[in-house]
Image: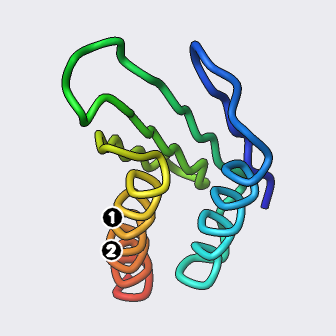
Amino acid sequence: MKVNVQSVNFNADKSLIEFIEKKVNGLEKYYDKIVDSEVFLKVHQTSEKENKNVDVKLNIPGNDLMVKKQCKTFEEGVMLAVDSLKRKLTQKKAKVRAK
């Protein structure tokens, strides 16, 4: 699966991009019809500690799945987003099998 990582207002380092690709590619275990994915990383210039946004969009035939998380670190945000997508993909697979 192709993973597009886009960082807004900063440059993401190589280790962060590799971490994201590894975690997002792991979603193929839960649903094998994923076409590709897009990950958007954004930093908001605020005084809050949780100023990092992670948006993960999975392109699946029929419809797309989108999850947005806001956390202290991008790694934490990616982990939470991937966990949410695992649940959504499991539900989608169950619906498809029920038909």
Query: In the picture shown, does residue 93 fall above or below 11?
Result: below
Give the Cα separation between the discs numbered 2 and 1.
5 Å
Indicate the secondary structure of the residue bearing disc 2.
helix
User: For this view, does 71 lie left or right of residue 8?
Assistant: left
Which quadrant of the rendered structure holds the N terminus? bottom right
Q: Position of residue 82 (x, y in %)?
A: 45, 64
Residue at the spot 61% in from the left edge and 63% down from the top edge:
24
Residue at coordinates 60% horizontally, 68% vertically from top-left?
Answer: 23
Say which of 50 and 67 sits in front.
Answer: 50
Tags 2 and 1 in contact by the CB under 8 Å rule? yes
Q: Quadrant of residue 38?
A: top right
Residue 12 numbered mark, or none: none
Of residues 80 and 94, the one drawn nearer to the viewer in this rendering: 80
Q: Position of residue 64 (x, y in %)?
A: 49, 46
Task: Look at mark 2 in the image and give the residue it sits on.
Answer: 87
Please state which amino acid type lies under the numbered disc 1.
Ser
Element type at marker 1?
helix
Residue 84 — which label?
1
Left or right of residue 52: residue 8 = right
> Going by the picture, which residue comes out furthest to the left?
48
Q: Mark 1: few, some, or many residues within 10 Å (few <14, many ≥20)?
A: some
Q: Is residue 40 above or below residue 78?
A: above
Say which quadrant the C terminus sits in: bottom left
Residue closest to the eye, 82 or 99? 82
Residue positioned 55% across, 32% down in the render: 40
The residue under label 2 is which amino acid type? Arg
